[in-house]
C-alpha cells in the first residue's frame, strides 16, 4: 500500500512539474518578442538618425555621370544625355528610391529632338541607369531663305547646329518649299510638300550618285505637287507625283523607279527626261512566274478509284 501511495504521489506531482515548464517557455517566448520589438524600435530610431546620410550616399543617388546611353549613331554629335537631363531638370542628384525615376528619365530622353523613340530604361543599384534609344536619321536639307534645314524621312525638323556647311552639302536638297517650320526642332515641319519631297528623295536615293543628282525641286500648283530631280548640270528628270499621290493615269512608284534605274545605268543625263513617259513606254503589265526549278513532266493518266 505504501508503494501504491508513493506512485500516486509521484503521478500527482507530474502536472505541477509540467506547468512550471510551460510557464518558463511562455516567459522565454515573451522575452524573444520583447527583444525583437526593441530591435525594430532601435532600427527605426537609427534610420531616422542615419537614413538621410545613407540615402545621400553614392550608391543610392543617381547622377548624370552614371547614366549610360545606347543607340546614339555617329551622325548625331550632340551630347544627348547631358541635354536631355538638363532640359528636364534631372541633371542633379536623383534618389534611387523614387518610384517614378525610370518614367521621368524616359520622358526626358523622349522629348529630345534627335530621339525618335525610347526603347528601354533600366535603373539599377548601385545607382546607375541604362537608356536605349532610336535616333532620327537626316534624309534631306530643305532650302529656305537664308540657308538649309535638315529633316528626316517623316518630315521632322532636326537640329541644324549639328551640321557644318560641308556636311550639309552631302545631303539631297529639297527646293521650292515656301513655308517655314511650324514648330521647333523635333517637331514635324507641318507642310505636306515637305513630307512628299522627302518621300521622293527616300525612294530615289540609291540612284542619286550615279545620276549626279543634287536637288529635288517642286513644280506645279499648290494643290498638286510634282517633283523634278535635278543634277549638278541643272538638267531635270521629271519624277511626277510623290509615292501614293499619283494622278489618274500616272505610272506608279515601282514603274518610275524601274525607269530611273535603267536611266542611272547610263550615267548622268545631259537633257531633260520625263520618267512618266519612259515608265509607260517600257512598263510590262504581265505578272512573271516564279521558276520552282522543277522540270516539265508528262501528265500521268488518272487511274479510276
Image (tube, rainbow, N blue to C red):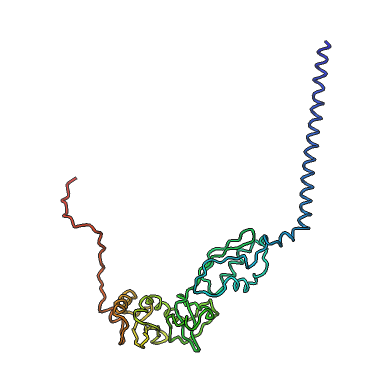
Q: Determine which quarter of the picture holds residue 234.
A: bottom left
Q: x, y percentage for residue 13?
A: 82, 22
The quarter of the picture where the N terminus appears is: top right
Q: Residue at x 58, y 65 (%)?
A: 68
Near-viewer residue (187 or 88): 88
- Number of callouts: 0
The residue at the far front in this view is 166
Q: x, y percentage for residue 41?
A: 78, 50
The quarter of the picture where the C terminus appears is: top left
Image side of residue 300 versus residue 205, left or right: left
Q: x, y percentage for residue 18?
A: 79, 27
Image side of residue 57 versus residue 232, left or right: right
Q: Is residue 178 above or below residue 116?
A: below
Near-viewer residue (298 or 132): 132
Near-viewer residue (84 or 301): 84
Q: Is residue 234 above or below residue 124?
A: below
Q: Is residue 172 above or below residue 106?
A: below
Q: Residue at x 49, y 74 (%)?
A: 75
Amino acid at each position: 500500500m505504501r508503494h501504491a501511495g508513493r506512485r500516486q504521489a509521484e503521478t500527482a506531482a507530474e502536472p505541477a512539474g509540467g506547468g512550471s515548464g510551460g510557464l518558463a517557455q511562455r516567459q522565454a517566448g515573451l522575452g524573444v518578442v520583447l527583444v525583437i520589438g526593441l530591435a525594430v524600435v532601435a532600427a527605426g530610431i537609427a534610420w531616422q538618425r542615419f537614413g538621410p546620410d545613407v540615402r545621400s550616399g553614392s550608391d543610392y543617388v543617381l547622377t548624370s555621370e552614371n547614366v549610360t546611353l545606347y543607340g546614339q549613331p555617329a551622325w548625331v554629335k550632340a551630347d544627348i544625355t547631358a541635354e536631355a537631363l538638363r532640359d528636364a531638370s534631372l541633371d542633379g542628384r536623383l534618389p534611387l528610391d523614387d518610384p517614378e525615376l525610370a518614367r521621368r528619365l524616359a520622358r526626358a530622353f523622349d522629348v529630345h529632338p534627335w530621339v525618335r523613340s525610347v526603347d528601354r530604361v533600366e535603373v539599377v543599384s548601385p545607382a546607375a541607369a541604362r537608356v536605349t534609344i532610336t535616333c532620327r536619321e537626316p534624309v534631306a536639307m530643305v532650302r529656305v531663305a537664308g540657308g538649309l534645314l535638315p529633316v528626316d524621312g517623316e518630315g521632322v525638323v532636326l537640329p541644324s547646329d549639328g551640321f557644318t556647311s560641308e556636311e550639309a552639302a552631302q545631303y539631297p536638297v529639297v527646293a521650292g518649299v515656301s513655308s517655314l517650320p511650324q514648330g521647333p526642332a523635333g517637331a514635324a515641319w507641318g507642310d505636306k510638300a515637305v513630307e512628299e519631297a522627302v518621300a521622293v528623295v527616300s525612294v530615289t536615293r540609291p540612284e542619286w550618285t550615279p545620276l549626279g543628282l543634287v536637288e529635288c525641286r517642286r513644280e506645279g500648283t499648290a494643290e498638286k505637287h510634282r517633283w523634278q530631280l535635278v543634277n549638278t548640270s541643272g538638267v531635270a528628270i521629271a519624277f511626277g507625283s510623290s509615292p501614293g499621290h499619283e494622278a489618274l493615269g500616272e505610272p506608279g512608284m515601282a514603274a518610275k523607279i524601274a525607269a530611273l534605274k535603267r536611266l542611272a545605268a547610263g550615267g548622268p543625263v545631259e537633257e531633260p527626261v520625263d520618267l512618266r513617259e519612259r515608265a509607260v513606254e517600257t512598263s510590262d503589265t504581265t505578272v512573271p512566274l516564279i521558276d520552282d526549278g522543277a522540270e516539265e513532266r508528262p501528265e500521268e493518266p488518272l487511274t479510276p478509284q
